[in-house]
Image (cartoon, rainbow, N blue to C red):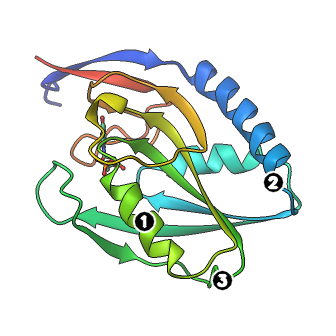
Amino acid sequence: MSTPAYDLEVLISAERIRARIAELGQEIARRQASRRLVCVGVLKGSFMFLADLVRAIPLPELEVDFIGVSSYVGTESTGVVRITHDLARSIEGEDVLLVEDIVDTGLTVRYLLDNLATRHPRSLQVAALLEKPARAKVHVPIDFRGFTIEDRFVVGYGLDFDGRLRNLPHVALLHPR
Ligand code: IMP
């Protein structure tokens, strides 16, 4: 096995994530007037956050769906987003919660909010585990935020580096050697 060209440093422990998600789940349920909610996870990065978040939202008529996106160019977000996997169902008239791993420049969430709004949901809100405000290029409303972090590249808990490290149970800083 080759030695990785990076070191990992725990930034947000699994325990802190768990505690914050428990709070977010209660807050989401409290602010939800109806019993229904469609949680839309943005693939792939949000899969772990979504899985834990929905278990913390005590609503009897919660549904889960996924939307997949990829930026057209390189690793830097360009705002030109392509839908690689669309929702399996209509969201017309539904209360929708878009669940994202991290809001970095904000361009992905901005695009998704504009796209989903054309499908006439009753309401459209955003939950993001992480936000990097220093990197924001466009303003996006984040209704439910896990943690605000500095402008550092993070991995784990769904977030990847070149497709890997999503399986870490915590959020870590990646330091190249
Ligand atoms: P945006 O710049 O807000 O459009 O961010 C789009 C996507 O970039 C996020 O959903 C993540 O998948 C990815 N991303 C942004 N920052 C990081 C990071 O620090 N680690 C891993 N992925 C990131």
Q: Is residue 121 above or below residue 163?
A: below
Where in the figure is residue 150, as x and y percent of width and height? 33, 21
Where in the figure is residue 1, as x and y percent of width and height? 18, 31
The residue wearing badge 3 is 92
The residue wearing badge 1 is 112
Secondary structure found at label 3: loop
Q: Residues within 10 Å of mark 2 (few under 14, many from 20)?
A: few
> Sequence order check: which comes first, mark 1 or mark 3?
3
> Sequence order check: which comes first, mark 1 or mark 2?
2
Secondary structure found at label 2: loop
Residue at figure coordinates x 34%, y 37% from the top left: 165
Residue at figure coordinates x 59%, y 50% from the top left: 50
Q: Is residue 145 above or below residue 107?
A: above
Where in the figure is residue 177, as x and y percent of width and height? 10, 16
Residue at figure coordinates x 36%, y 32% from the top left: 132
Locate ligand 1 by image quadrant: top left
Residue 36 shows in the view: yes
Measure the C-alpha gap from mark 1 to mark 2.
21 Å
The residue wearing badge 2 is 32
Residue at figure coordinates x 17%, y 66% from the top left: 72
Q: How many marks?
A: 3
